[in-house]
Image (cartoon, rainbow, N blue to C red):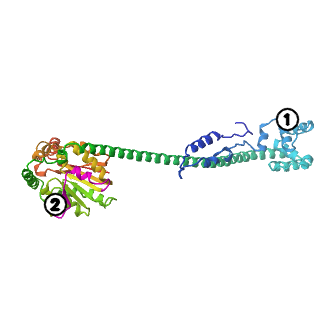
Amino acid sequence: MHQGQDVTIPFETLAAEIREKARSLRSENPDPHSLLEDDWQQLQPGRLEQFRIRQSTSRGQLLQFSGNDVVSAVYRMVLKREADAEGLRIYRSLMDSGAHPYLIAGLLGISREARELGATSAEFALYRLLAYVLKFQRVVPGLRRLIFALARRFAGASRKADQQQFWLDQVAAMSTSLTGWHAVLTRQNEMLAAMDHRIERTNQSIRQAHEQFSTATARINMRMLSAEARGQSQDFAQAPGESPSDPKLAAELDRYYLAFEDSHRGNAEQMRERYKPYMLELNRIKQSSVSNKPFLDLGCGRGEWLEFVAAQGITAQGIDLNPVMVKQAVDKGLHARESDLISALRGHADGSLAGVSAFHVIEHLPFAVLFECVAQAWRVLAEGGMLIFETPNPENLMVATHTFYHDHTHRNPLTPSSMQFLLQYWGFKEVSIKRLNPYPEKDRVPGEDLLTERFNGHFCGPQDFAVIGIK
């Protein structure tokens, strides 16, 4: 870096890049958080204070010269002209005798020519005073040497002062430049924040579009499936039972199934205890926007779940194919009617229900019926509505190989992972598995080793599971 030169840190490239980024943020519907191109006009180079380094004061610049060049520089600095031959001779002689260049400037500063020019720079004021004193050297012996010595000492002090001032000037220049850069970086941060906001909004729009697409696809598939199902055998709609041709035999089978339920499902008090794990789900419905809509129970049987739901302040209605069970529910004052589950679901309008449930029903269904059942449930549920299907848990080997087949109308066990996927396929969110009703502690094999724990897990674990999904 050369003395007396300016050093400029260019900003044109950065400003151009930032303006280009700002232009990319423009859209047909401007966002209040985004920055428009006009906001970035202040980033043009002319709007920022350029950082210029000035190497020295004019007084300090004299020290870079020597010989006649010093005298010539002093003439240009003080008298604003080139030195004449006589002046060069006289002042060069004084310098050879020990006079400091600053004292030469002081001597020129008290000349008649300087006074006429008004050349009274404050930088050489002290040396002009020494020059006046030097005029008396012929009167006071030894004064010349004293003046020369004082000039050199003062010049040393002046040089330190010049250096200090130089660095103060540099600090001030840097501070001004940094202030400008701070404004630039602040605006750049604002731009980046606006870009982040725009990206997040775009991602949100993509997610919403994906959900809408999934919803539309599910509805189309469900309607296609419903149309196909209407042309299929009515046996699908009649599950879980098989309707014999003899009405008397059919009625006897209904009574048998009620007796079987009484024997194997438990009494009303036991059923209330078994439903308590669902309090969290029912409370969620009560606190949601769908709380004013009814809850439909498929295969309501004797109506224990309807009673439990109604006790939580939620309107409940149920359907079942067994007229004996429906009568028991109605006799309790519950809203129940005789119907197959597909017909019941098809009879409800889109988004009309807060919840759809089925307890130990889906294991009775052919898969085509179960498939449409989930699709129809998704259709009739309101946004935020809930689907609950409970079924025997084949993860418990005693259930999978033995107790599942107590009920002659069971078709095949359903696994938690397959049911979770089925709900997700039709668009349900937050699909979860709730494992319930493990064997009592007395039935577990005693022991705490790893093998015993694994045995108990497979043979004494939860006997039922529920798959739960939110629309």
Name the residue tied to disc 2.
329
Amino acid type at circle 1 is Asn
- Residue 450 is left or right of residue 44, and the answer is left
Viewer can see residue 393: no
Q: Position of residue 280 (x, y in %)?
A: 27, 57
Amino acid type at circle 2 is Ala
Q: Quadrant of the N terminus?
A: top right
- Residue 264 is left or right of residue 125, and the answer is left
Q: Give the Cα distance between marks 2 and 1.
A: 123 Å
Residue in the image at 65% along x and 49% along y: 175
SS at mark 2 in the image: helix
SS at mark 1 in the image: helix
State which region is magenta.
332-352
Q: Position of residue 147 (x, y in %)?
A: 84, 46
- Residue 145: image tag: none
Q: Does residue 143 lie above or below 87 as drawn? A: below
Q: Nearer the viewer, residue 264 or 191?
A: 264
Residue in the image at 58% along x and 48% along y: 36
- Residue 68: image tag: 1
Q: Nearer the viewer, mark 2 or mark 1?
A: 2
